[in-house]
Image (cartoon, rainbow, N blue to C red):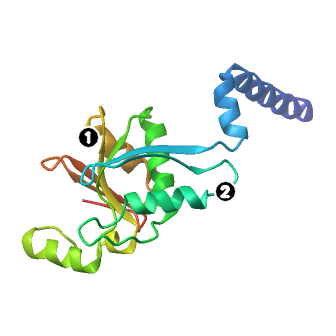
Amino acid sequence: MDKIDHHRRKWLTLGSAAIGIALLPGQAIASLSTARPRILLLNNLNTGESIKAEFFDGKGYNREELVRLNHLFRDYRANKTKTIDPRLFDHLYRLQGLLGTTKPIQLISGYRSMTTNNEMREHRRGVAKQSYHTKGQAMDFHIEGIQLSNVRKAALKMRAGGVGYYPRSNFVHIDTGPVRTW
């Protein structure tokens, strides 16, 4: 009798899981089982440039689109470009999913050359000497139409790197470094 009950429980559990999956919307099932393109819409607030980039085609990163994104994230003060860690774009894409938005991301600061970073350190508080911005692994931004505190909460929920919150300056910082917050 114990064997029958145990076996029956397994079948009931599997059946319940199957019914649960069947009740999910078709789009949710598709997103769980198939790789999808990842598209970002960004505005660089310092240069006025905008970009819509499909940086991941569902199978791999699109090099041409990454080059375009690297240019948008450049240090506009020194006109220097660096390869941005593609995981940063993945974080942004995931963040938009958590927030349920495809609104444009307003880029405030991406890559910074060491010269720019050092100049900023002389005139502003809170600029790190070994900033992840200088490594192409960080950005400061907000998302059009989304409350900044909600952007922060979603970024913290991801536990995917550093998250800084600057409500007075109207931006959130994310990076691909270790998980930490300030």
Disc sitting over residue 60 in the figure: 2
Q: Which residue is mark 1?
A: 149
Residue 58 position within the rendered picture, expressed as x and y whole percent measured from the top left: 67, 47
State left or right for residue 47 relative to residue 93. Answer: left
Residue 89 position within the rendered picture, expressed as x and y whole percent measured from the top left: 47, 54
Relative to 133, residue 29 above or below: above
Disc sitting over residue 164 in the figure: none
State left or right for residue 86 relative to residue 140. Answer: right
Looking at the rendering, which quadrant does residue 98 occupy? top left
As helix, strand or loop, the secondary structure at mark 1 comes to: helix
State left or right for residue 3 relative to residue 54. Answer: right
Q: CA distance from mark 1 to mark 2?
A: 32 Å
Residue type at numbered disc 1: Ser
Q: Which quadrant: the N terminus?
A: top right
Residue at x 82% of width, y 33% of height: 10
State left or right for residue 66 relative to residue 108. Answer: right
